Amino acid sequence: MLVKINSIATVGLDTIPVDVEVDVASRGFPGFTVVGLAGKAVDEARERVKTAMVNSGFDFPGKKITVNLAPADLPKNGAAYDLPIAIGVLVASGQIEKPHSATYFYGELSLDGSLRPTRGILLLALFAQRKKGAEIYVPEPSAPEATVVPRVAVYPVGTLMRLVQHLRGDMKIRTLTHKAISNKDSCTVTDTDLQDIAGQEQAKRAIIIAAAGGHNLLMWGPPGTGKTMLARALPGILPPLQPEEALEVTRIYSVSGLLAPGTAVMTTRPFRSPHHGVSAAGLIGGGVNPQPGEVSLAHLGVLFLDEMPEFSRSVLEGLRQPMEDGVVEIVRVSGHVRYPASFTLVAAINPCPCGYLGHPRRECTCTPKMIAAYRHKLSGPIIDRIDLTVLVSPVEVEKLSVTKQSPDARMSSTMAKELVTQTRVIQKRRFSGTGLYTNAQMKNRDVKRFCNLTPEAENFLKVASEKYDFSARSYMRLIKVARTIADLSESEKILPVHMAEALQYKQLS
């Protein structure tokens, strides 16, 4: 008997329907074959399915069983085909009735018949949403992430036996209730508050501008001046993810298998801080079966590179495309995948290998050759893609004194978050219907449309560009930063004072 069970395959963030065709032949030598360009994990499903069925009390047919995963020219990877294969064998052997055409099965089986957490459940729900009356049967630990998708019946399956009882009508599984995405319960916990950082007022201002507009930021200065602390304080001032943003981020974490069991949706912005030994595939994405890298996991959040010159130059050069386009294209012989990667880059560097070049009290021990080699790690195109550059100087001892500090006089992370959130609301209204979220995401045509400069500000920009010989990219990025500074002061037009502040952060580069 031949049966077809619905499932899906994920290629990057794209979802492709897969027909799991199961044939239990009455003739031929007993065997269990899986075809259809199946990967190693799919090929091993034969043993998992057989053992799970037997341990769940079902009869495993001692006949020739052939499983075809169609389309056959699409690579299939992962263990999510265990459940549809098991259901197909049960239907083909006459132990249960065939489900209706809008039913999808997806999940990994344990040897005892229970279902394990499986990646990509959200993508399955979004795909099934296109069909009227769709039902999806997925592992119970991963089912909550599908509840954010309306008009889809989500059945959390604990064990294979429990699923069969439901399909037979003996004991129904209750569907999960749809839950709209909300950021009311969002809370970013961080150990560092802006108020706890002594001095560095200009660097704090740069952090707020970067958070408000999603701009790339480079902090440079000697060791121990607070660069890392400032970066660690950044998550505490970022606004919560809006529903449409949360869905974008959750899709990436779902397909990567990084959503904790029971988690429905990401509500806080990602903050990724990879070690400088990370590979190009780890940072940008890749592998035999291309997976998202750190730049995609930081989508709509922050990618922090501490001691940026310590990263391999070839790895850093891979940042060019995502920093410019907000996406990553991973090309393989079998095809290519596309992952979103619109992140805010925050980098910290020392002026030289020892870190004390230009220090007022410490002597630099580096040779000119060492300094040149150190700075050579950061190419011109990478520096040109950074919007804000700020010097983080050594803090005076008086400002470090506990008795002389006055926390009430400094801006706390809570106050900064309110300011940043208010600025993001302004941008949300401005970019309504465009697919943009922040000023940093604007393309050249958007800059001309949304950035209204006064004649004085435009003349200021023209003079500065001619004097410092800005590239076209730097010219546009300067306007974007000025737009954010104007938004922070709730100014509809970009004034010369806004352009001047934006310029001071550009000149340090």
Image (cartoon, grey):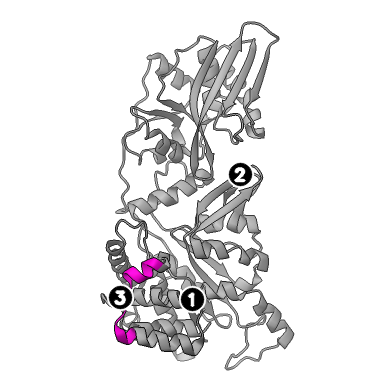
For the point 51% across and 44% down, which residue is it? 255
* Viewer-nearest residue: 320 or 40: 320
Q: Position of residue 374 (x, y in %)?
A: 67, 78
Q: How many marks?
A: 3
Q: Which mark is residue 452?
A: 3
Q: Amino acid at mark 1?
A: Ala
| Mark closer to the chain start, 3 or 1 | 3
Q: From this viewpoint, is residue 414 visible?
A: no
Mark 3 and mark 1 in contact? Answer it, CB < 8 Å.
Answer: no
* Viewer-nearest residue: 267 or 466: 466
Quadrant for the N terminus, please: top right
Q: Position of residue 132 (x, y in %)?
A: 33, 29
For the point 56% across and 47% down, which residue is it? 337
Q: Amino acid at mark 3?
A: Asn
Q: From this viewpoint, is residue 491 visible?
A: yes
C-alpha distance separating marks 2 and 3: 43 Å
Query: What is the chief secondary structure element of the magenta stretch?
Result: helix
- Reply yes or no: does residue 348 show up in magenta: no
- In the rendered image, which residue does mark 2 sit on? 335
Q: Amino acid at mark 2?
A: Gly
Q: Position of residue 219 (x, y in %)?
A: 52, 77
C-alpha distance separating marks 1 and 2: 34 Å
Label 2 element class: strand
The residue carrying pointer 3 sits among few (fewer than 14), some (14 to 19) or many (20 or more) residues within 10 Å by Cα, namely some
Give the vertical position of 393 relative to 172 (above or below): below
The residue carrying pointer 2 sits among few (fewer than 14), some (14 to 19) or many (20 or more) residues within 10 Å by Cα, namely few
- In the rendered image, which residue does mark 1 sit on? 472
The residue segment tinted magenta is 445-457
* Viewer-nearest residue: 200 or 249: 249
- Reply yes or no: does residue 449 show up in magenta: yes
Mark 2 and mark 3 in contact? Answer it, CB < 8 Å.
Answer: no
